Image: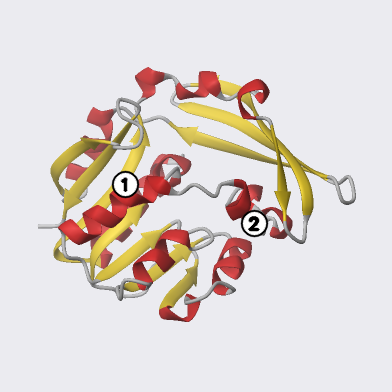
Amino acid sequence: MADDSFAHPRLAAIYDPLDPDRSDLDAYLRITEEFEARRVLDIGCGTGVFALLLADRGIEVVGVDPALASIDVARTKPGSEQVRWICGDATALPPLQVDLATMTANVAQAITDPHTWHKTLRGAYEALRPGGHLVFETRAPARRAWEEWTRENSYRVTEIPGVGSVESWVQLIEVSLPLVTFRWTYVFAADGQVLTSDSTLRFREREDVEQDLVAHGYVVEDVRDAPDRPGRELVFLARRP
């Protein structure tokens, strides 16, 4: 089940203006070029930002996400007709043969249930052609990123055209490693509505991720530092033999 930040229609509609800087996707664009991928599966595509960047480059893209509200936002964007949108997840995909499967941003960590995680790795593997790659990122647990998830560090007011002012902030709810739970709060000035969205992320150790990939038949080709967050996140590149 998707978090309300993605699944609630009012929150999905403001997701992009609240997080306009998607320079984190640059690394994935470079990897797409590096592997000369022409067909890409974007797992956890959300509001379609990465999928549409790829489609604009002439790449055939399938975007899958469990949050219908986010898919609906993606479908309103210019060029959306070039992408095949699927409301669902990677555990039950139609037959595909893609060159590259991606899980950008928090997608891999948001899959907290071990059974679902293994089914996701299996689903991505089956969607890849032989020689195709799976790429995703995860935060390094040792950096304890959650210690920075406070109202003081995150509070902001965003002016959104057609919506008005929206206050937003995050606060930590529970740390029970490897799981960390936090809550985003949103206050709409136009009518005073307050909405919250609780999220839980699983902080996996590098060795555990590599073992999971190998167990599902992947060859781990590289584990890279996230270029925009050096020392804080790892990018895994795994190949289907």
Residue 47 in picture, x, y percent from top left? 54, 61
* Picture disc at residue 136: 1
Secondary structure state at the residue bearing disc 2:
helix
Residue 143 seen: yes
Above or below: residue 1 compared with residue 140: below
Q: Quadrant of the C terminus?
A: bottom left
Secondary structure under tag 1 reads strand
Could you say which disc has been placed on residue 69 in the image? Answer: none
Quadrant in the rendering for residue 122: bottom left
| Front-lying residue, 9 or 53 | 53
Q: Residue at x 67, y 59 (%)?
A: 13
Q: Residue at x 69, y 55 (%)?
A: 8
Specify whether 79 is left or right of 94.
Answer: right
Q: Nearer the viewer, residue 238 or 211?
A: 238
Q: Position of residue 159 (x, y in %)?
A: 73, 48
Would residue 92 be visible to someone looking at this image? no
| Alpha carbons under labels 1 and 2: distance apart | 23 Å
Judged left or right of residue 181, residue 240 is: left
Q: How many marks?
A: 2
Residue 110: x %, y % from top left: 47, 42
Residue beneath disc 2: 12
Q: Residue at x 45, y 43 (%)?
A: 106
